[in-house]
Image: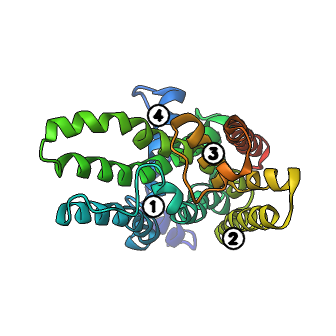
């Protein structure tokens, strides 16, 4: 045997295989841009409430939701136990009195929808498919507005259903309560749109969730404090315009303008401003906030 024979024998006895690990071609239907936007919208809406995520992710959204619904359930219980007894909440002032819970939901969950995508650097995956950058921004914003609408609508429906079912004549009570449906449905819409636009416009500018949450809370706290201080410490035009600094006062003025029923605790009436001013400013918040979110994602590095 020569010196080459062991190497030749080893080579001849070796075995191996080549595997094709590449991507497979897809021959199925391509649903396109509309389906991509719809999928992102529903996924973001579920994310706003922590659905299909860990139990820890559900604590804040579901906890705040429970706290927001609880007073409505208490009102219904009081009405059931003591018919005709005065209740602390009505359709008109429910969301105004519990606005702090809605603000906390905005601060906690707006960053959940957008900051994590930036932090995990997955935007390039979204933008490499059928989605346009503006599609991504509008789907996220629309999903968050829908989440806020659902959050605000549920306690209003609890009040509505409770008033109907506790009546001696349910069909008659249902007919009587129908006149309150604009308030039941319209007030959540008026809360959801500007708060979603404002919260997402802030959250979209940082990948750090804690920073976004802190910034949103600061905007709500500072605007309310400055508006109240200027309203009390000044006179004339400044005192009249001071309430317009607080987003929740703007929302309540718009609700009063479109749906009626002035709230005594709200500074809207004391401002002396025409109610359409509040509606115009709320519309501006929605449009500017939406434009800011879209602008951000058109220029963000994916």
CA gap, disc 3 and disc 2 = 26 Å
CA gap, disc 1 and disc 3 = 87 Å
Q: Residues within 10 Å of mark 1 (few under 14, many from 20)?
A: few
Is there a contact, CB below 8 Å, between mark 1 and mark 2? no
Of badges 1 and 4, nearer the viewer stands: 4
User: Residue at 60% of width from left, 35% of height from top?
Assistant: 131
Q: Which mark is residue 253?
A: 3
Q: Which residue is mark 1?
A: 12
Q: Earlier in the sequence, mark 3 or mark 2?
A: 2
Kind of element beneath mark 4: loop
Q: Earlier in the sequence, mark 1 or mark 4?
A: 1
- Most distant residue in the left direction: 168
Q: Which residue is mark 2?
A: 214
Kind of element beneath mark 2: helix
Of badges 3 and 4, nearer the viewer stands: 3
Q: Which mark is residue 25?
A: 4
Of badges 1 and 3, nearer the viewer stands: 3
Q: 104 and 201: which one is in front?
A: 104
């Amino acid at each position: 045997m020569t010196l080459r024979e062991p190497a030749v024998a080893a080579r001849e006895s070796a075995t191996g295989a080549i595997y094709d690990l590449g991507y497979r071609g897809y021959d199925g239907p391509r649903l396109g841009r509309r389906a991509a936007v719809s999928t992102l919208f529903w996924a973001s809406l579920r994310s706003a409430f922590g659905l299909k995520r860990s139990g820890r992710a559900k604590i804040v959204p579901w906890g705040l939701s429970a706290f927001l619904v609880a007073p409505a359930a208490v009102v219904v219980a009081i009405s059931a136990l003591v018919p005709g007894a005065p209740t602390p909440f009505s359709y008109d002032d429910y969301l105004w009195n519990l606005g702090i819970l809605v603000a906390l939901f905005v601060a906690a969950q707006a960053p959940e929808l957008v900051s994590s995508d930036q932090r995990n650097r997955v935007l390039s995956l979204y933008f490499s498919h059928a989605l346009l950058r503006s599609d991504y921004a509008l789907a996220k914003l629309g999903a968050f507005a829908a989440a806020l609408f659902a959050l605000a609508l549920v306690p209003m429906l609890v009040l509505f259903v409770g008033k109907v079912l506790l009546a001696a004549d349910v069909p008659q009570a249902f007919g009587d309560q129908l006149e309150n449906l604009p308030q039941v449905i319209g007030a959540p819409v008026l809360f959801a749109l500007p708060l979603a636009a404002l919260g997402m416009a802030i959250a979209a500018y940082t990948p750090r969730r804690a920073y976004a949450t802190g910034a949103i809370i600061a905007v709500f706290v500072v605007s309310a404090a400055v508006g109240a201080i200027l309203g009390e410490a000044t006179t004339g035009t400044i005192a009249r315009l001071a309430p317009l600094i607080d987003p929740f006062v703007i929302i309540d003025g718009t609700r009063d303008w479109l749906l009626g029923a002035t709230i005594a605790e709200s500074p809207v009436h004391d401002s002396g401003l025409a109610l359409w001013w509040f509606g115009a400013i709320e519309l501006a918040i929605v449009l500017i906030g939406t434009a800011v979110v879209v602008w951000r994602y058109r220029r963000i590095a994916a």
